[in-house]
Image (cartoon, rainbow, N blue to C red):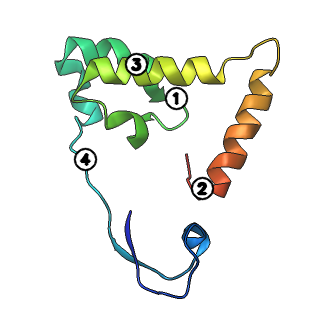
Amino acid sequence: MLFRHVSDHCEIGNTHKCECYKVLGMAWIEVVPDEKWSDDAALESLYGRVVDKNHGRVDYIMSIHSLNPRALAAHDGLYRSAMAGTANLRKAERELIALVVSLENECHY
């Protein structure tokens, strides 16, 4: 969503927790609809990796890359690398960290 701060009483740096924002609207990025991914060989090859198998669709956070399959593959690779378990943190621990960060940022992903 796009926001604009509408108050002068907040301290700089603390505005992310302020309730003085006015919602201006939702940003929109053109995407290739899920049912059209089979029309593009690069997208079709990535579909199985990025589809949310529980809901049978590609989440918007991934589909925004559908106009650039190389960017989609890079995003997916980065995500998988960041979330894979290592000697220091298991995958479950990384998922918990991601959950806490998402909650703090008020992000449903």
Instruction: Confirm whether residue 59 shows in the render.
Output: no
Q: Earlier in the sequence, mark 4 or mark 2?
A: 4
Residue that carries the numbered disc 3 in the rendered image? 74
Q: Between disc 3 and disc 1, whose residue precedes?
A: 1
- Where residue 26 appears, as percent x and y from the top left, is 32, 63
Distance, label 2 to label 1, CA atoms, is 25 Å
Location of the C terminus (image quadrant): top right
Q: Please name the residue that numbered disc 1 is placed on.
A: 53
Q: CA distance from mark 4 to mark 1?
A: 23 Å
Are dots 4 and 2 in contact, CB under 8 Å? no
Amino acid at pointer 3? Ala
Give the number of the mark in front: 4 or 1.
Answer: 4
Q: Give the x, y percent position of residue 92.
A: 78, 28
Residue 102 disc label: none
Q: How many marks?
A: 4
Residue 98 vertical placement versus 77 (above, below):
below
Residue 55 rendering spot, x and y as whole percentages: 50, 38
Task: Please tell me whether mark 2 sits on a helix, a strand or a loop.
Answer: loop
For the residue carrying disc 4, how many other residues have a C-alpha within 10 Å: few (<14), some (14-19), or many (20+)? few
Q: Which residue is mark 2?
A: 105
Q: Nearer the viewer, mark 2 or mark 1?
A: 2
Asked whether the beta carbons under mark 3 and mark 2 sit within 8 Å of each other, the answer is no
On the rendered structure, is 70 left or right of 8?
left
Closest to the observer, 78 or 50: 78
* Labels 4 and 3: the sequence-earlier one: 4
Q: What residue does disc 4 label? A: 29
Q: Residues within 10 Å of mark 3 (few under 14, many from 20)?
A: few
55 vs 65, nearest the viewer = 65
Q: Where is residue 7 shown, x and y percent of the image?
A: 46, 87
Q: Quadrant of residue 12?
A: bottom right
Q: Residue at x 38, y 62 (%)?
A: 1
Q: Amino acid at mark 1?
A: Lys
